Image (spheres, rainbow, N blue to C red):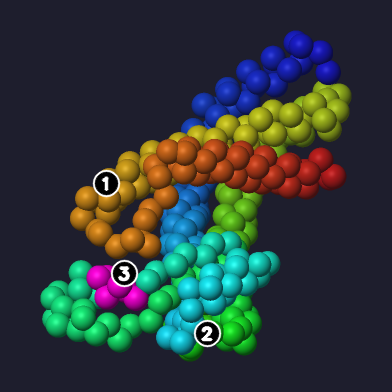
Amino acid sequence: MNINSIRRHFRESFKSLGRNGWMTFASVSAVTVTLLLVGVFFVLLMNLNNVASNIENDVKIRVHIDTAASQENIDELGAQLEKLKEVSAVSFSSKEEELKNINETLGEAFSLIEQDNPLRNVYEVQTKNPKDVIDVAKKIEKLNYVEVVKYGQGEVEKLFSVLDMSRNIGLVLIIGLLFTAMFLISNTIKITIVARKKEIEIMRLVGATNSFIRWPFFLEGLWLGVLGAIIPIILIGTTYYNIQDYVTSKVNISFFELLDFSPFVFQVSGVLILMGALIGVWGSMMSVRKFLKM
């Protein structure tokens, strides 16, 4: 294919969009609505996954040390904890620090017990993979000088189960919307091409090859997909910016953080343009193939 043919295909694809105004509008509208839904669910899923990861990473194992343990025993236990392959970080909190934290959280109600502090020294253990918390806790329980191991037994298992279910449901919805989008857009573009059946027949009568006929439709599907992605990108970007600004200033929950506007929205924009282009091209190719086989 030479340069003149490529220019001709580009020129014809743009002319076709103008000639078939209402069909172009219908196709772009179908792409716009579908990509808007896909984009919204994609943004929700990614932020849900981010919040879920923050919650998972916030789960720590608290190892309460036996009061009979000497400083040497405490240091030895800390070294054993750090040697566990699943552990990423170990921090020590003395019983004085524990009491101070309680006073800061609950007020001075516990200040009377400072002289006879009943609390224990504690090691806080962070795992590399949050899902390893339960297994690591069981290993720690078997170590010497460990009095109690706490990690939210019972609740952590439920939390991980709910988070996994939420992720799976979100992923299924995204995949379902993608297939729905491909079906709707393919049918919309198919109607456009059916209306131009005579145009294809005339091109074949004058000796045009199948590849020569496909190219304008290929490019037209590409433009339809890209045009259909513009409005969803603008709406999602503007709405996300305002929501993130509100959440940042009003919501003060450590694990509830939305993904940063940049680069997240630009990544979503790229995904939507790519999806629109691929769906538009796929719809055009599937539709025009039927007529080229006749």
Mark 3: few, some, or many residues within 10 Å (few <14, many ≥20)?
A: some
Part of the protein shown in magenta: 95-101
* Badge 2 amino acid: Val
Question: Mark 2 — residue?
Answer: 146
Question: Which residue is most to the top?
Answer: 4
| Element marked by disc 1 | helix
* Badge 1 amino acid: Asp
Can residue 163 be seen? no
| Element marked by disc 3 | helix
Residue 115 is situated, as x and y percent measured from the top left of the image, at: 21, 81
Q: Which of 87/5 is in front?
A: 87
The residue sitting at 62% across, 53% down in the picture is 182
Q: CA distance from mark 1 to mark 3?
A: 36 Å
User: Total of numbered circles in the picture?
Assistant: 3
| Mark positioned earlier in the residue sequence (1 or 2) | 2
Q: Which of 270/31 is in front?
A: 270
Q: Which of 172/103 is in front?
A: 103
Residue 5 in which image quadrant: top right
Residue 261 is situated, as x and y percent measured from the top left of the image, at: 39, 42
Residue 79 is situated, as x and y percent measured from the top left of the image, at: 60, 68
Residue 14 is situated, as x and y percent measured from the top left of the image, at: 58, 23
Is residue 218 depicted above or below 159 in this figure? above
Q: Quadrant of the C terminus?
A: top right
| Mark positioned earlier in the residue sequence (2 or 3) | 3
| Mark positioned earlier in the residue sequence (1 or 3) | 3
Question: Mark 3 — residue?
Answer: 97
* Badge 3 amino acid: Glu
Question: Mark 1 — residue?
Answer: 245
Is residue 119 depicted above or below 284 in this figure? below
| Element marked by disc 2 | strand
Can residue 285 be seen? yes
